[in-house]
């Protein structure tokens, strides 16, 4: 091996023999450019979509809306049809993509479909003022495509569209005109969305239906749930906010336990940081009640001390995970 550090870690018992053999095999093999190629292909999709958009914008008067819609529809049908013919049979487990070009065509077809729906609404207002329906239909199609073709990127688009649909459905006028997110309706809506995504994550692993989708669901679910709980905590008065802080800490503890069992330092970090934000908010709001200059000094001392403690705790947590070989 080129780096003797792995051998030293193995000799000290910090790295198992299995992990050492896997690292050694990866170092001795050929250099992979898989992610570099995929990045270039995805960049190519974005550049092509942007170029088509600029071409349409500059020649809209001479081309005509019907011709543009027909072209986008044919492009969508062509890309998705080609992918349907070349995809592997559907399975509940992970299905490996045939090649990188397949991902390219699938993403291009999906973006073309979204462009088609958006163009119909913008130019002809086929959905009228029913913004919930205008976002619901693309959301259903995106979820279907994500599972049918087993694509994490499309699943991310579907989750984003789900968030948009829920926000537009509950307060369409306020959301689109005022963009006021500091209200109870938005807080409860996105708290519900976060919990739904967490439930979808656990269901995917429990039912063994696309278990590798767990991370995407769990990632967005954790962030949305904690952000909504923090928003509720700071939205309500000092007395009523204790209930929301208690709920935040309970959720953080439950997610923390699962993350520790699975050895995911990323989700452990999120639980710790969001809990720290909530507890820090409690400390600051308590000290502010003093209405004295000493409160400012105490707040300053608190953040210095708690920051050092947080760093030490995370460092010890990382070492604990490595000792248990959760790499």
Image (spheres, rainbow, N blue to C red):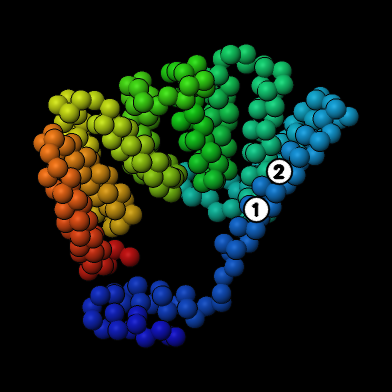
Which mark, by number, is residue 227?
A: none
Residue 121, horizontal then vertical, whole percent: 66, 21
Can residue 129 be seen in the rendering of this structure? yes
Residue 71 in the image: state x and y as whole percent.
Answer: 80, 33
x and y percentages locating residue 184 in the rendered image: 32, 21
How many marks do you count on the picture? 2
On screen, residue 124 versus residue 241, left or right, reads: right
The reply to whether residue 211 is visible in this rendering is no
Q: Which image quadrant is residue 3 in?
A: bottom left
Mark 1 vs 2, N-terminal side: 1
Please tell me which residue is depicted at 68% across the width and 40% down the height of the picture.
Answer: 109
The quarter of the image holding the C terminus is bottom left
Secondary structure of residue under mark 1: helix
The residue pinned by badge 2 equals: 50
Snapshot quadrant of residue 135 = top right
Query: Measured along the vertical axis of the image, is residue 230 above or below residue 1?
Result: above
Tell whether 172 sits left or right of 80.
Answer: left
Q: What is the CA distance from the residue labelled 1 to the residue labelled 2?
A: 10 Å
The residue carrying pointer 1 sits among few (fewer than 14), some (14 to 19) or many (20 or more) residues within 10 Å by Cα, namely few
Number of other residues with Cα within 10 Å of mark 2, as a class: few under 14, some 14 to 19, many 20 or more: few
Q: Nearer the viewer, residue 216 or 304?
A: 304
Q: Residue shown at 18%/41% (left/top)?
A: 284
The spot of residue 134 in percent (x, y) is 58, 21
Q: Which residue is mark 1?
A: 43
Q: Is residue 312 above or below residue 149?
A: below
Which residue appears at 51% of the width and 40% of the height? 155
At horizontal 88% and vertical 29% (from top left) the residue drawn is 62
The N terminus: image quadrant: bottom left
């Amino acid at each position: 091996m080129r780096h003797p550090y792995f051998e030293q870690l193995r000799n000290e018992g910090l790295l198992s023999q299995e992990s050492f053999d896997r690292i050694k095999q990866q170092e001795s093999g050929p250099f992979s450019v898989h992610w570099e190629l995929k990045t270039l292909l995805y960049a190519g999709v974005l550049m092509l979509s942007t170029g088509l958009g600029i071409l349409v914008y500059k020649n809209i008067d001479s081309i005509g809306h019907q011709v543009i819609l027909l072209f986008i529809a044919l492009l969508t049908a062509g890309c998705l049809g080609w992918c349907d013919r070349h995809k592997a049979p559907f399975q509940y487990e992970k299905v490996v993509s045939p090649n990188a070009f397949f991902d390219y065509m699938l993403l291009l077809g999906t973006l073309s479909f979204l462009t088609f729906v958006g163009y119909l609404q913008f130019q002809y207002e086929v959905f009228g003022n029913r913004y919930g329906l205008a976002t619901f239909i693309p959301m259903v199609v995106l979820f279907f495509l994500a599972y049918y073709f087993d694509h994490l990127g499309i699943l991310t688009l579907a989750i984003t569209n789900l968030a948009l649909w829920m926000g537009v459905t509950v307060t369409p006028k306020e959301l689109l005109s005022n963009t006021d997110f500091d209200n109870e309706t938005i807080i409860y809506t996105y708290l519900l969305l976060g919990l739904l995504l967490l439930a979808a994550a656990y269901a995917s692993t429990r039912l063994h239906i696309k278990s590798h989708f767990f991370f995407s669901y769990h990632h967005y679910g954790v962030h949305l749930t904690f952000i909504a709980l923090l928003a509720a905590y700071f939205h309500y008065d000092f007395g009523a906010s204790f209930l929301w802080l208690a709920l935040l800490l309970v959720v953080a503890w439950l997610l923390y336990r699962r993350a520790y069992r699975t050895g995911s330092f990323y989700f452990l970090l999120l639980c710790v940081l969001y809990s720290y934000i909530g507890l820090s908010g409690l400390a600051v709001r308590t000290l502010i009640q003093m209405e004295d200059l000493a409160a400012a000094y105490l707040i300053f001392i608190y953040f210095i001390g708690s920051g050092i403690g947080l760093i030490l705790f995370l460092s010890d947590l990382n070492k604990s995970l490595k000792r248990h070989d959760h790499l």
